[in-house]
Every structure is written in structure tokens, then in C-alpha cells.
């Protein structure tokens, strides 16, 4: 059974810091891994999708890496801003459904 | 273009009543998914549709839960004889259904269900 774990559970940093969020999964037989952002009272926004054959994806200040063999992914956020405050979720695509981690709650203070 | 929409946005019901939650996927998306998120917990997969067939219902927690989809459009999630543990945010997502690893799922804003 696929299990997805995210650490840390919560993170509070001052504006401008670079930070790394971690995601690990137990079954490496995945199609892809996705990172989402969830704002309070709102749905999920897709940030990055990494196919199983890829090592990383970049979008603006965000960079996600994937090491499928070791069951790990990291989301790197450069020059964090208060608007980055949200819960970040990673999810692995297990054929026809996403298996989610419990998320990292990020707060960036001015 | 329009994203995934869900209705109602909030629903309060009494224990034992039936509820229907609606999802309108992005036009042209053949795949549709239902998830739920209980307070303080992660998202749980409920059911997946490809077109109007449901090849994976493995996440439905009990036979009180059912879902239908009309063609490649609207889906309805029905919960019969609601229980307090059904209280959660129910999220719907859709994707192109064009398999090959590049399957971003786009999520709706969710329906917040509270069973009293």
C-alpha cells in the first residue's frame, strides 16, 4: 500500500528565505508526482508535475525534484514571500488516483 | 476557461438525512475524481470515473456512498443516512484522461459538509 509522508508538518520562516519541503513515498511504481498548494477554504492549485522519467521541474521560484528509486521528492522555494503562505501537498499518481501526503503548513512572515 | 465547479459550497444537514453533492468538470476532461478531506487529515481518494464508468470505487467508505456521472460531464456524489463522521470537505477534480504520465488533476473549491 502506497504511503506518502511529508516533513516538516509546519514551517515558519521570515520573508526572503530559501526553503525545502520534503516528501517521501513507499512504492516507487508511480506514473508521476505532483505538488499542490492549498489555501484555507479553497481548493487545490497544481504547482508542478514531475513524470516518473523526469528528475525535476521548475516554475518561477519553485523547483521540484524527484528521486524515484529512493522514494523522495523535494520542493524548493526560492526567496519566499508572505503570499507563499499556504499548505503544500505532494501526491503520487498511483495509476488512477492520487495518494496524498498530509502536507506542510508554511507561514512566511514579513 | 472555466475551472472545476462544485455545488453547494457549504451544506449543513442532520444525521440520517441524504445529501447530494455536485461536480462540473472542465469541459473536455474525460476523467473525474472525488476525494474527501476530514478535519486535520489528508485527502482520501473516493472514486474515479473515466467517461461515465467507474473503474475504481475502492475509496468509497461504505455502501451509503454512491456516485454517478452523466456522459463526460456532471457527476453527483450521494451520501445516504449521513453520519457525523461524514463531515468533511468533498473535493472533485478532473483531468484530460489522456494517459501517458502527464495527467495534472484540476481541483474544484470543494463542498464543506457538516452533519449535526
Image (cartoon, coloured by chain):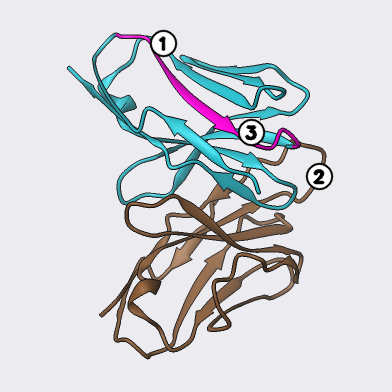
Chain colours: A cyan, B brown
Give the vertical position of A98 relative to A82 (above or below).
below
Relative to B4, B101 lies left or right: right
Q: Which residue is mark 1?
A: A78
Query: Residue A89 in the image: x percent, y percent?
Result: 47, 37
What range of the chain is rendered magenta? A17-29
Give the vertical position of B89 relative to A1 (above or below).
below
Badge 2 and badge 1 both on one subunit: no
Give the vertical position of B1 relative to B91 (above or below).
above
* Foreground residue among B112 and B64: B64
Residues at marks 3 and 1, CA–CA distance in whole angstroms:
20 Å
Query: Residue B52 in the image: x percent, y percent?
Result: 75, 71
How busy is the neighbourhood of tag 1: few (under 14 within 10 Å), some, or many (20 plus)? Answer: some
Give the vertical position of B81 relative to B27 (above or below).
below
Q: Which residue is mark 2?
A: B99
Badge 3 and badge 2 both on one subunit: no
> Element at badge 3?
strand
Residue shown at the point (46%, 14%) measured from the top left:
A61
Query: Residue B101 in the image: x percent, y percent?
Result: 77, 37
> Element at badge 2?
loop
Relative to B76, B110 lies left or right: left
Q: Which residue is mark 3?
A: A33
Relative to A18, A55 lies left or right: right
* Foreground residue among B78 and B45: B45
Query: Residue A5 in the image: x percent, y percent?
Result: 50, 36
Badge 3 and badge 1 both on one subunit: yes
Protein chain holding label 2:
B
Q: Quadrant of residue B93?
A: bottom right
Q: Quadrant of residue A107?
A: top left
Amino acid at each position: 500500500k502506497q504511503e506518502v509522508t511529508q516533513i516538516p508538518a509546519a514551517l515558519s520562516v521570515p520573508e526572503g528565505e530559501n526553503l525545502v519541503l520534503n516528501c517521501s513515498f513507499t512504492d516507487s511504481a508511480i506514473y508521476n508526482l505532483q505538488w499542490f498548494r492549498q489555501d484555507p477554504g479553497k481548493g487545490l492549485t497544481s504547482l508542478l508535475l514531475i513524470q516518473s522519467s523526469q528528475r525535476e521541474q521548475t516554475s518561477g521560484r519553485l523547483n521540484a525534484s524527484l528521486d524515484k528509486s529512493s522514494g523522495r521528492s523535494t520542493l524548493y522555494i526560492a526567496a519566499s514571500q508572505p503570499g507563499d503562505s499556504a499548505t503544500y501537498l505532494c501526491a503520487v499518481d498511483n495509476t488512477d488516483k492520487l495518494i496524498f501526503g498530509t502536507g506542510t503548513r508554511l507561514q512566511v512572515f514579513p | 476557461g472555466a475551472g472545476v465547479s462544485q455545488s453547494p459550497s457549504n451544506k449543513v444537514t442532520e444525521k440520517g438525512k441524504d445529501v447530494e453533492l455536485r461536480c462540473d468538470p472542465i469541459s473536455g476532461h474525460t476523467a473525474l475524481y472525488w476525494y474527501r478531506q476530514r478535519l486535520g487529515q489528508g485527502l482520501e481518494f473516493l472514486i474515479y470515473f473515466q467517461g461515465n464508468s467507474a473503474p475504481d470505487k475502492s475509496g468509497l467508505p461504505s455502501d451509503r456512498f454512491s456516485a454517478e456521472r452523466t456522459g463526460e460531464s456532471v457527476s453527483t456524489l450521494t451520501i445516504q443516512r449521513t453520519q457525523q463522521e461524514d463531515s468533511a470537505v468533498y473535493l472533485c477534480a478532473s483531468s484530460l484522461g489522456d494517459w501517458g504520465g502527464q495527467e495534472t488533476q484540476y481541483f474544484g473549491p470543494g463542498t464543506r459538509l457538516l452533519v449535526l
